Amino acid sequence: MRILGIDPGLATMGWGVVRGKANKPSLIACGVIETAPETAFPRRLFEIEREVGKLIEIYEPDAIVFEQLFFAKNVTTAFTVGAARGVAIARCARYTQELYEYTPMQIKQAVVGYGKAEKSQVQQMIKLLLNLPAYPKPDDAADAVAAALTHYNAGRFAAEHLMK
């Protein structure tokens, strides 16, 4: 099973592909999709849609996982990131209906065992769980890998996180 994890963002959208083989996850690839702040907003959304499409073509995931958005203060940022997430979801929905989402707390719980873990703890556990020489960088890529790992570890409970 190949799982594409996506950490939504407008300026930087993290992605990570994890493969589950013989009950052992492994990292296939990870990175970020970046858009420039000086680029017009509609063009940035188009670039995200195009790049997510390329990831789907290259890695042919069996499932795609999104981290749910959480914003406590900045409403403007929430709207723009929400738009970027929506474009990515729409592109992924053209490929598969196997779209899932997990909250940041669920991801931390699944990877570290503590829902309020620090980012550095999540990164360290990704490194250990995937037997990597270093944790994935930048942070957005590591977050996307953590989302993919969460889905891998969800097993039979994954269906509870299917987007509706």
Image (spheres, rainbow, N blue to C red):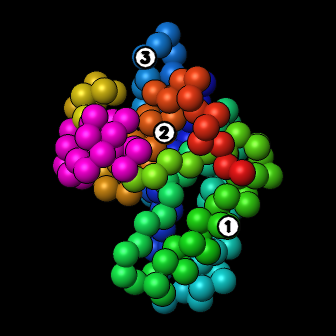
Q: Residues within 10 Å of mark 2 (few under 14, many from 20)?
A: many
Counting from the top left corner in percent of width and height, residue 130 is at 33, 27
User: First in sequence: mark 2 or mark 3?
Assistant: 3
Residue that badge 2 annotates: 148
In the structure shown, which secondary structural element does the residue marked by tag 1 occupy?
A: helix
Q: Which residues are magenta?
A: 105-124
Q: Quadrant of the N terminus?
A: top right
In the structure shown, which secondary structural element does the residue marked by tag 3 occupy?
A: strand
Q: Measure the C-alpha gap from mark 2 to mark 1.
A: 19 Å
Residue 116 within the segment the image draws in magenta:
yes
Q: Measure the C-alpha gap from mark 2 to mark 3.
A: 13 Å
Seen at 56% across and 29% down, the residue is: 157
Note whether 51 is above or below 151 in the view shown.
Answer: below
Counting from the top left corner in percent of width and height, residue 18 is at 49, 33
As drawn, the label of residue 87 is 1
User: First in sequence: mark 2 or mark 1?
Assistant: 1
Q: Residues within 10 Å of mark 3 (few under 14, many from 20)?
A: few
